Structure formats: C-alpha cells, structure tokens
Image: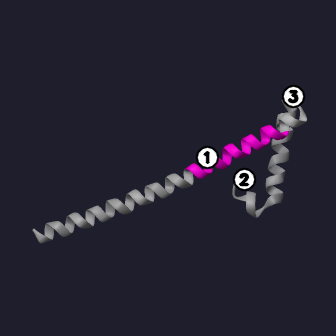
C-alpha cells in the first residue's frame, strides 16, 4: 500500500476508505474513523521508513567491513 501513496492516489484513497469502513464497523464515530485511519497510515509509513533506514545502515556496515578486510589484506602483504 505504501508504494501507492505518492504514485497512485486512487489506491491510497481506496485503502483509507476500507480502513475507515473497518473502524466504523467497530462502532467509532466519523471523526474517530478518519483520525484512526490516518494514525494507521502514519504508523505504516513510519515502519517502512525505519526499514529503509535500516537497509541503508546495513549497507554502510557491509561497505565498512569490506573496506576493513581490504585494508587488513593490504597490511598483510606489506608486512
């Protein structure tokens, strides 16, 4: 769903409508339904942003590890 936020607004609106319908079925009023759907959407966006950030950190760690390994191999050949 998150890939649709900026690129497919109709799909995002459909998700919001279905989330609002689910919350309304649980007995929430209109204001709570809309606010609850926005909170759910914000939580999903935050979770995906954290996942992307962690991917970047793991890539950085991998590059640093490869750099350290190359440095150690170079040091062995110099000694």
Q: Quadrant of residue 12?
A: bottom right
Residue 15 against residue 9 in the figure, above or below:
above
Residue position for label 1: 47
Read off the residue under disc 3.
27
- Tell me how far mark 1 sits from mark 2, CA to CA: 12 Å
The residue shown at (61%, 46%) is 47
The answer to whether 33 is drawn above or below residue 75 in the figure is above
Is disc 3 surrounded by few (<14), some (14 to 19) or many (20+) residues within 10 Å?
Answer: few
Q: Which mark is residue 16?
A: none
Q: Position of residue 1 (x, y in %)?
A: 72, 53
As helix, strand or loop, the secondary structure at mark 3 comes to: loop
Q: Looking at the image, is mark 3 or mark 2 earlier in the sequence?
A: 2
Single out the residue that lies furthest toward the top.
Answer: 27
Residue 66: x and y in percent read: 32, 63
Gap in angstroms between the C-alphas marked 3 and 1: 27 Å
Q: Nearer the viewer, residue 64 or 19?
A: 64
Where residue 31 sits in the image (x, y, percent)?
87, 36
Within 10 angstroms of label 1, few (less than 14), some, or many (20 or more) residues? few
* Residue depicted at 87% across the width and 34% down the height: 24
Q: Is residue 35 magenta?
A: yes
Real-space Cα separation, disc 3 to disc 2, in angstroms: 25 Å
> What residue is at 17 percent from the left and 67 percent from the top?
75
State the mark number for residue 1. 2
The magenta segment is: 34-50
| Mark 2, secondary structure of its residue | loop
Q: Where does residue 54 sit, x and y in percent of width and height? A: 50, 52
Q: Name the N-terminal-most of marks 1 and 2.
A: 2
């Amino acid at each position: 769903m998150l890939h649709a936020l900026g690129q497919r607004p109709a799909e995002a609106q459909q998700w919001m409508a279905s989330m609002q319908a689910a919350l309304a079925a649980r007995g929430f009023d209109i204001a709570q339904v809309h606010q609850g759907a926005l909170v759910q959407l914000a939580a999903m966006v935050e979770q995906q942003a954290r996942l992307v950030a962690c991917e970047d950190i793991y890539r950085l760690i991998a590059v640093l590890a490869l750099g350290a390994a190359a440095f150690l191999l170079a040091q062995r050949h110099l000694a």
